[in-house]
Amino acid sequence: MEQGARNTLYKLLSTVSLLLLLGAIVLAPCVDATVSEGNIELQNSQKRRNNSWGAGTHAVSSEPGQLVRRRLAALVSPQPLVLPYHNGPILSGKNNITKLYIIFYGEFSKIQRYTVRKFLRSLAPPRHRARASIPTVAKWWEITKGFQDVYGESVAQLLIPSGEIQDQMYSRGMNLNQTDIEALVLNSLTTFDISARSLYIVVTASDVAVTGFCQEACGQHGYLYPSDTTGGQMLPYVWVGDASTQCPGLCCWPFANLNYTFMENTQDEPLRPPSGDVGADGMVINLATLIAGAATDPYQNAYYEGDAGAPVEAAEACRGIFGQGAYAGYPGDLRQDNATGVSFNVIGFHGAKFLLPWMWNPMTFACAGQA
């Protein structure tokens, strides 16, 4: 074959190969999000890995960012993410009120306890509603108002902290599993009211090891099966751990650097946490994610996408998104305090600053930070 003919054939084959490669990339299911006109819409969301806690529990994955091909966004037709309703109950509360009971297990600093308390206190609307231009924790929670059950009832909008236990003596040791977490909730029922319309929260200290923590999950939400102790009710609960010493890059991002070496375009330095404590603000992020999941899918039969054993729920559907323009390794455009340099996206009780994950809005079928 003459040299000119060989060159022509080579160019033709190279062009065909390039077109096939582009086609494979565009059709690949690894594209999780597209950025269009400032709005982020998720598609083909990666389902969480199965966790070792079994039935009655659901985990927040320790993977804080999805691998997103941002430059290919224009080549993919955006599809709205839908979390189907499976006709199960939600936490509609009693008279629109859900009581929150919290158990601090282990030793926490005053800042850590105060930060968690302030966040929980911020979920209910303040007496004097903030200006529309000010993003608040309450308006973030207001997104859940769009989740309704078969009776037309919405998720309760008044979340009221109603009791606290501090177990500083590590009553069940420093190595816990699901049985231990549930035992802590069961034991608390001698102090707290017993109600399936309430939510029980367990927070474990940085020196407490919990099965699956930092490996499969940053926290869990689940429920206790009916028993004499629970008054024959299924009681929903949430557990999160302080990951500041065990896995900050997995469960405290973006206040700690990601642990992934393959991710590109990640921020050079971790953000400064509003409270000044990486563990405290990391717990707030995971608490927000899990409380939203527990309220909209308390028994794994309400609002979720995918398999019931590894469901994608309200806030988890928007994993890694904290502001406009978010992509893998970048949380999005956030607010920054000029005096302290801390990063945040909402204001809470007594002006406290928090960074909360965006949540799927059932009214718009897209991720949002405010109702």
Image (cartoon, rainbow, N blue to C red):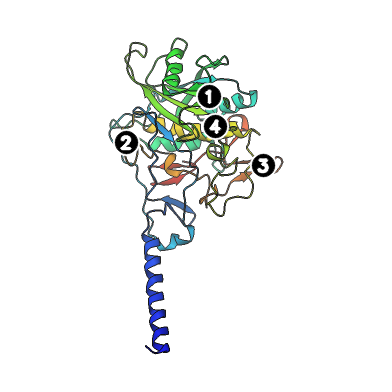
Q: Are marks 4 and 2 in contact (CB under 8 Å)?
A: no
Q: Secondary structure at mark 3?
A: loop
Q: Which of pointers 4 and 2 lies earlier in the amino acid sequence?
A: 4
**Circle 3 crowding by C-alpha within 10 Å: few under 14, some 14–19, many from 20:** few
**Quarter of the figure that contains the N terminus:** bottom left
Position of residue 142 measured from the top left corner of the image (x, y, whole percent): 45, 36
Return the residue nearer the eye: 369 or 5: 5
What residue did someone put label 4 on?
A: 283
Tag in front: 1 or 3? 1
Q: Going 40% across and 30% down the picture, which residue do you hit?
A: 294
What residue did someone put label 1 on?
A: 204
Tag in front: 3 or 4? 4
- In the rendered image of this protein, does residue 265 appear above or below residue 346? below
Q: CA distance from mark 1 to mark 4?
A: 10 Å
What residue did someone put label 3 on?
A: 337
Amino acid carrying mark 1 in the image: Thr
Q: Which of pointers 1 and 4 lies earlier in the amino acid sequence?
A: 1
Q: Residue 308 bears which disc, if any?
A: 2
Q: Are marks 2 and 3 in contact (CB under 8 Å)?
A: no
Q: Which of pointers 1 and 3 lies earlier in the amino acid sequence?
A: 1
Q: CA distance from mark 3 to mark 4?
A: 21 Å
Position of residue 268 measured from the top left corner of the image (x, y, whole percent): 63, 50
Q: Which of pointers 2 and 1 lies earlier in the amino acid sequence?
A: 1
Q: CA distance from mark 4 to mark 2?
A: 25 Å
Amino acid carrying mark 2 in the image: Ala
